[in-house]
Amino acid sequence: MTNLYLQEIMSELKLAVTERNHPLKFCVLGSIGSDNSSQTRIIGLRKITNNLTLTFYTDERSNKVSQILKNPNVSLLFYHPEKKMQIKIDGKASIVKDQDLLKEKWLNINSESKKDYTTTKAPGSILENPSELTFLKEKNYFCIIEVKTKTVEYLKLRETSHFKVLFNKDINGWTSQFLVP
Ligand SMILES: Cc1cc2nc3c(=O)[nH]c(=O)nc-3n(C[C@H](O)[C@H](O)[C@H](O)COP(=O)(O)O)c2cc1C
């Protein structure tokens, strides 16, 4: 019976990749800082596979990349306001090294979006003035992050009683438990 919820999660997240303005297109990616502090930021979902590996694009110089390289444990938090549905995913992140894949995806990015990965200075660097922002022509820092899901927590807010279920992925597939919401 809980499979229905997993199917709903999967189909909504797949729609988020393809549909314009889908409420699950952007999520909060939580990682662990070098001082063990929690670090969060919004990020756009680019791809999701049937076994719940999620793909994101970023600049390889960004803080999240060095945090993931040091500690790959991450959380992803999505919220669908119309469905009153929260999805929290815990998993292990990795940085894609496959140069052919990076090249293929890079070629599919439009020229305006390419600027997100070609600033002369690294993301987070101090600028005396926003007009100082310049872009590299010959080099890019395009980077792909993949998150392999370990657990998915589904929360639905309802008029009568809220509802929460936790899915755990193991070698045999998914197990689930209902939780007090
Ligand atoms: C709506 C929205 C979408 C964003 N999408 C991305 C994204 O897909 N990739 C990304 O690296 N940063 C994205 N950002 C910027 C990040 O939130 C963040 O500011 C930036 O990546 C630097 O994060 P870091 O220093 O924690 O690594 C987005 C921000 C907003 C507000």
Image (cartoon, grey):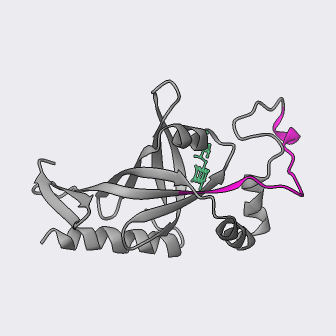
> Closest to the observer: 119 or 159?
119
Q: Position of residue 171 (x, y in %)?
A: 26, 63
> Closest to the observer: 146 or 116?
146
Q: Position of residue 173 (x, y in %)?
A: 24, 67
Q: Residue at x 64, y 64 (%)?
A: 98
Would you identify the image quadrant in which residue 139 lies?
bottom right
Q: Is residue 89 left or right of residue 171?
A: right
Q: Is residue 59 left or right of residue 176?
A: right
Q: Is residue 57 left or right of residue 5?
A: right
From the viewer's perspective, is residue 57 above or below residue 2? above
- All told, the count of numbered labels is 0
Q: Which residues are magenta?
A: 129-145
| The stretch drawn in magenta includes residue 130 | yes
Q: Position of residue 119 (x, y in %)?
A: 80, 47
Q: Is residue 105 visible?
A: yes
Q: Residue at x 84, y 44 (%)?
A: 120
Q: Residue furthest top?
A: 35
Q: Position of residue 63 (x, y in %)?
A: 61, 38
> Closest to the observer: 95 or 45?
95
Q: Is residue 19 visible?
A: no
Q: Residue at x 46, y 44 (%)?
A: 72
* Quadrant of the rendering where the N terminus is positioned: bottom left
Q: Residue furthest front?
A: 171
| The stretch drawn in magenta includes residue 134 | yes
Q: Residue at x 84, y 43 (%)?
A: 133
